[in-house]
Amino acid sequence: MEHNSRQIRTEIGVFLILTLILSTASVLPIITLKTLDAQGGLFVLLLMWSPGVSALVTTRLFHHPLNSLGWRLGKPRYLLIGYLLPLLYGLAVYGLVWLSPWGALDRSAGFGPVRILVSATLLVLISILSALGEEIGWRGFLVPRLAELMGFSRAALVSGIIWLVWHLPLVLLADYNNGMTPIGYAVVCFGIMVIGISFPFAWLRLKSGSLWPAVILHAAHNALIQELFDPMTQNTGITPYLIGEFGAGLALAGIAVGVFFWRKGRTDFQPHRTTEPG
């Protein structure tokens, strides 16, 4: 058992070192130019694939089969959860803001029900390309190995902290943050959200035995929050403090879904049993 734990720690260490090297090569041009739009977003795409490439290389270095990363689709209900979860917490946060004095639905943008449905579907499909790169690494490789060492709860927490630290150069040194709130406020809200939603990410990966529900969750979150709900919202001045990945609304949503899936994980996962049979 101790030998196996040492092996897993070594694999995680190699993965993190490779991710650091590849991510640094991608993030330096971004922070030099201080924009995610550098070279048309090419460096952001390369950055998002850094964990995935690192996981693939580490898997081969240690002679594990590539299907250990969770390539099978798994049961459809987990894919559906991955899609619906950001829609539910997004509508809860943005719906409350639209109905409050601190924000409003931007009706001039022409977002009717049909356009919202079509836009959401297309945006999620497009976002899968970049989300897959991260998820091969974070949830395909890292979460199952952390879970073997420390169980579900700590694996979700530790993977969330690593995921947060990986994002911080973009928040602190480029224009990933919304630029309309104090940087300390933005980092705290973003950090709470990222760590909170790491629990459903980990639960989906371990419960389904597949990385694809996490890919769908990641793609749906990025598409719905960044590309749909944010543009649909009028800025009344206080709005940036409430919406988006750097606002209090999604931070609170992250706490809510984090606690929910933390409690589910404590019930669902027994030691050394992290995937659903069949």
Image (cartoon, rainbow, N blue to C red):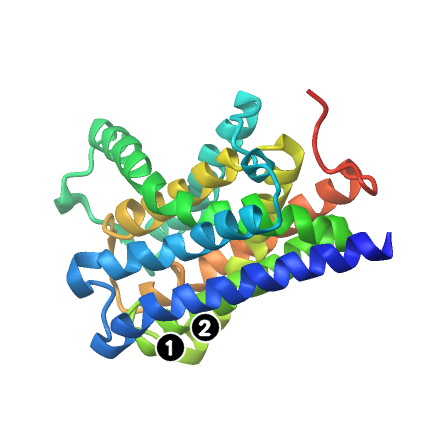
Sequence-first disc among 2 and 1: 1
Q: The C terminus appears in which quarter of the rendering?
A: top right
- Disc 2 marks a residue whose amino acid type is Val
List x then y, in percent, for residue 94.
Answer: 38, 49
Q: Residue placed at 41% from the left, 57% from the top? A: 50
Q: Is residue 270 above or below residue 55?
A: above
List x then y, in percent, for residue 269.
Answer: 77, 39
Which quadrant would residue 160 be assigned to in this image?
bottom right
In this view, the residue in front, 47 or 197, is 47
Mark 2, secondary structure of its residue: helix
Marks 2 and 1, how far apart at CA: 8 Å
The image's mark for residue 172 is 1
- Disc 1 marks a residue whose amino acid type is Leu
Mark 2 surroundings: few (<14), some (14-19) or many (≥20) residues within 10 A: many
Q: Residue placed at 76% from the left, 36% from the top? A: 268
List x then y, in percent, for residue 7.
Answer: 73, 56
Q: Residue furthest right?
A: 1
Mark 1 surroundings: few (<14), some (14-19) or many (≥20) residues within 10 A: some
Q: Residue placed at 55% from the left, 52% from the top? A: 58
Side of 25 relative to 68 (left or right):
left
Q: How many marks overall?
A: 2
Which quadrant would residue 215 be assigned to in this image?
top left
- Mark 2 = which residue? 187
In this view, the residue in front, 83 or 100, is 83
Q: Mark 2 touching mark 1, by CB under 8 A? A: yes
Which quadrant would residue 110 be assigned to in this image?
top left
